[in-house]
Image: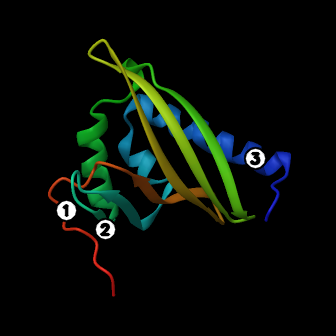
Amino acid sequence: MYEPSDEELKSVEDWFAQYDALAEQGTIERLADLAVFPMNLATDVPGGFAAVRQWTREEYVEAMREAMGGGTAELGMESVRTPHFLSPNLVFVETTATMTVEGRRESMHYGDLLVRTEEGWAFQTMAQGGWGHGWPPARRG
């Protein structure tokens, strides 16, 4: 099992601080600059099975514009992140986020695989339940 240094842990915290600031501002193109494409997605179809696909940069930007609109600043988003380093260059980060939507507090749990690139950390895989409305279920083989 790989044990990250304090510096490595801080580098992931710093990456998410940058990501969160860009998300608050709604600068989707700059968020896309922090990713590696094609991006892998794993989710599930409510009442069904898992669903997976890959997004191009253009598909990611379109989906995030729809999900984030002009940014997340008004949502009062609070996130607790737990990084699990698989190696010095791969870290899976579990996040529990709580936000206020139309006066209601809502929570979600998801994970991101970050990969270390020459430019620094980038997210490459997103995993979260419930996004697969209309997606075909995953199939083996």
In the rendered view, tell whether residue 73 sits above or below residue 18.
Answer: above
Residue 31 in the image: state x and y as whole percent.
44, 46
Q: Residue at x 44, y 46 (%)?
A: 30
Q: Nearer the viewer, residue 131 or 18?
A: 131
Residue 44 in the image: state x and y as whole percent.
30, 57
Residue 71 in the image: state x and y as whole percent.
35, 30
The residue where tag 2 is placed is 53
Instruction: Give the Cα distance between marks 1 and 2.
Output: 9 Å
Q: Nearer the viewer, residue 48 or 59?
A: 48
Q: Amino acid at mark 1?
A: Trp
Q: Nearer the viewer, residue 4 or 34?
A: 4
Instruction: Give the Cα distance between marks 3 and 2.
Output: 29 Å
SS category of the residue bearing label 3: helix
The residue where tag 3 is placed is 9
Is 13 displayed left or right of 35 in the figure? right
Q: Residues within 10 Å of mark 2 (few under 14, many from 20)?
A: some
The color scheme shown is: rainbow
Residue 2 in the image: state x and y as whole percent.
79, 63
Q: Residues within 10 Å of mark 3 (few under 14, many from 20)?
A: some
Q: Marks 1 and 2: which is nearer the front?
A: 1
Please tell me which of labels 3 and 1 falls first in the chain: 3
Kindly indicate whether the residue at mark 2 contacts the one at mark 1 (C-beta within 8 angstroms): yes
Kindly indicate whether the residue at mark 1 contacts the one at mark 3 (C-beta within 8 angstroms): no
Please tell me which of labels 1 and 2 falls first in the chain: 2
Q: Quadrant of residue 68?
A: top left
SS category of the residue bearing label 1: loop
The residue where tag 1 is placed is 135
Quadrant location, the C terminus: bottom left
Instruction: Give the Cα distance between marks 3 and 1.
Output: 35 Å
Quadrant location, the N terminus: bottom right
Q: Residue at x 14, y 58 (%)?
A: 134
